[in-house]
Amino acid sequence: MADTTKTATLTIDGQNYELPMHSPTAGPDVIDIRKLYAQAGVFTYDPGFTSTASTDSTITFIDGGKGELLHRGYPIDQLAAKSHYLEVCYLLLYGELPTAAKLEDFEARVTNHTMLHEQMMNFFRGFRRDAHPMAIMVGVVGAMSAFYHDSTDINDPWQREVASIRLIAKMPTIAAMAYKYHIGQPFVYPRNNLDYASNFLNMCFSVPAEDYQPSPILARAMDRIFTLHADHEQNASTSTVRLASSSGANPFACIAAGIACLWGPAHGGANQACLEMLREIGTVDRIPEFIARAKDKDDPFRLMGFGHRVYKNFDPRATVMKESADEVLDLLGVENNPVLQVAKELEKAALADPYFAEKKLFPNVDFYSGIILEAMGFPTSMFTPIFALSRTVGWISQWKEQLSDPQLKIGRPRQLYLGSTPRDYIDIENR
Ligand code: CMC
């Protein structure tokens, strides 16, 4: 950890405590409070972690004010324009862009692991047909630890590597099978002559009865969605993966925990919630009513797909995603899709409204990814599974980084207790 000569002084009841500070390669300095409780007998209080760095990391950097997102130092817009998902996976996992030979080897390794253990099909079949695909994913990914015993030993670097490749390779197969099961169609096996994104489209949209040729424009848009969701530093699901892993849990259990956290509408579930909101708005003439509700303090309604905890200027992923959305909508047309018409008009209306400008609320990545996925023909219930499969590499990279930290400790936050002080048990007849 990079040290500085700076310290912070904390005064409690006239007593001074010197706290060391650390300077990052980018971003604000941090005050190191690890010894604070031992020295001063106090905790810090930061629910929601708004001012707390939970770890050091070399993977991803976000400057929310500037609207900057870097993976291993490379800006996301350059990666989205010039790279592709599997190359970004390599970069996140191993820290550097691969040579052509290393990329070829990595892609071959991922491709060799795309199939699922055949017995896992029975596991899918145990779910109700109307199960949400995220519920199936949490269960199936957690169950991988029961199918791949040879990659659950976190102390063996080789097993950690195999688990990482397996998760990246199998997640599209799991997401696509969750979808096929949900709609009552036969599972489509992976095809290793297709690229990562085309293979996923094929597993979702092809049926045995007909030929299916994934469109290169749609495959590119799919790959961009994967790339733009690949990692996002210490967000809620990544922090969940790290917390689960801090106890020594196996990788499949940790990633299942991340998927569960991602499901919530304030996180990865926002893309589904956003499309449901667009459907509820229904027609362009109702947009002012919903904008008024979003601004009303007494109404819990929020414009889904707008705002971000870290980005207070713009979400750089949304800028790229918007271009992709425009390309896909040009290809597929929006004229006959009222949801997409509402999306286009809502974006315009919110951006022109001073409330959203003053609070720095802009469309985030989920707003545009939802639009693209809707146009491609995915049901809303598949939006968050697609986010989960894209984010798997980020979770895995952060998990690997955490396990290589010699100072790794189990995560164990403390609390500000506001409950009863000790009191005597009252027998039931006296209550
Ligand atoms: N619509 C209307 N008002 C909003 C919205 C919104 N979408 N988002 C924030 N605000 C208002 C909020 O009411 C508050 O107003 P005031 O200062 O008057 O109380 C102010 O803006 C700040 O909001 P906050 O809740 O303190 O901000 P936060 O950083 O805690 O929340 C957020 C960030 C993303 C949870 C929130 O903006 C939100 O709920 N957005 C909708 C859900 C969404 O799109 N989530 C996806 C996030 S991007 C993908 C990901 O990282 O998972």
Image: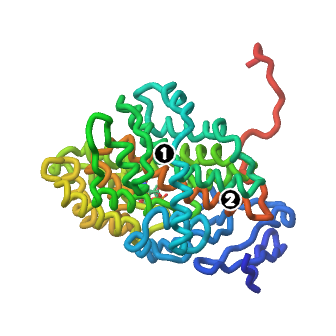
| Secondary-structure class at tag 2 | loop
Which quadrant of the figure contains the C terminus? top right
Seen in the image, is 118 located left or right of residue 212?
Answer: right
Residue type at the position of mark 2: Tyr
- At a point 52% along the width and 51% down the height, the residue shown is 169
Q: Which residue is mark 2?
A: 45
Q: Are marks 2 and 1 in contact (CB under 8 Å)?
A: no
Q: Which residue is mark 1?
A: 264
Q: Residue furthest right?
A: 39
- At a point 64% along the width and 64% down the height, the residue shown is 52
Closer to the eye: label 2 or 1: 1
Residue type at the position of mark 1: Gly
- At a point 71% along the width and 78% down the height, the residue shown is 22
| Secondary-structure class at tag 1 | loop
> How far apart in space, not on screen, are marks 2 and 1 (Cα)?
24 Å
Query: Which quarter of the picture shows residue 328?
Result: bottom left
Of residue 313 and residue 324, the one placed in the foreground of this image is 324
Residue 202 in the image, given as x and y percentages of width and height: 35, 46
**Relative to 154, does residue 94 appear above or below in the rendering?**
below
Question: Counting other residues with Cα less than 10 Å from the Cα at mark 2, is it few (<14), some (14-19), or many (20 or more)?
Answer: few
Residue 347 in the image, given as x and y percentages of width and height: 26, 60
Q: State the scheme by which the image is colored.
A: rainbow
Question: Counting other residues with Cα less than 10 Å from the Cα at mark 1, is it few (<14), some (14-19), or many (20 or more)?
Answer: some
Query: Which quarter of the picture shows residue 5?
Result: bottom right
Of residue 427 and residue 71, the one placed in the foreground of this image is 71
Q: Residue furthest top?
A: 429
Seen in the image, is 82 located left or right of residue 332?
Answer: right
- At a point 72% along the width and 79% down the height, the residue shown is 2
Residue 131 in the image, given as x and y percentages of width and height: 44, 30
